[in-house]
Amino acid sequence: MTKGTPSMGKHGSKKQHIPCRRCGKSSFNVVKGVCASCDYGKSPRLRSYSWAKRH
């Protein structure tokens, strides 16, 4: 097998993100064990930023 771009196509068979048990969004990273949306697995507080608030 060759190195580089052709072999990178073989990395899409497994799921990277699954539904989070705290926020319910499909943004819980299986490898890192952290939710990208609510920060579950990293912080006891919900992840929120003032610049991300909808007006």
Image (cartoon, rainbow, N blue to C red):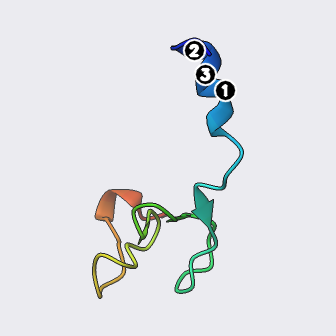
Where residue 35 appears, as percent x and y from the top left, is 45, 69
Q: Residue furthest front?
A: 1
Residue at 43% across / 74% down in the picture? 38
Label 1: state its secondary structure: helix
Residue under label 3: 7
Q: Residue at x 35, y 73 (%)?
A: 47
The amino acid at mark 1 is Gly
Task: Quickly name the residue at label 2.
Answer: 5
At 29% from the left edge and 75% from the top edge, which residue is drawn? 42
Report, in whole angstroms, how far the alpha carbon at label 1 lies from the one at label 3: 5 Å
Given residues 1 and 51, the one toward you in this image is: 1
Determine contact: label 2, label 1, CB under 8 Å.
yes
Q: Residues within 10 Å of mark 1 (few under 14, many from 20)?
A: few
- Give the SS element for disc 3: helix
Q: Quadrant of residue 15?
A: bottom right
* Badge 1 vs badge 3, beta-carbon distance below 8 Å: yes
Other-residue count near label 3 (Cα within 10 Å), few / some / many at <14 / 14–19 / ≥20 = few
User: How many angstroms separate mark 2 from mark 1 (CA)?
Assistant: 7 Å
Label 2 secondary element: helix
Left or right: 37 in relation to 7: left
Of all residues shown, which one is farthest toward the right? 13
Say whether marks 3 and 2 touch (CB < 8 Å): yes
Residue 54 lies, in percent from the top left, at: 49, 63
Numbered label tally: 3
Q: Is residue 15 above or below residue 5?
A: below
Q: Quadrant of residue 43?
A: bottom left
In the rendering, at what x and y percent does residue 9 appear? 66, 26
Which residue is the site of mark 1? 9
Q: Position of residue 39 (x, y in %)?
A: 37, 72
Question: Does residue 40 appear left or right of residue 17 in this picture?
Answer: left
Q: Amino acid at mark 3?
A: Ser
Label 2 sits on what residue type? Thr
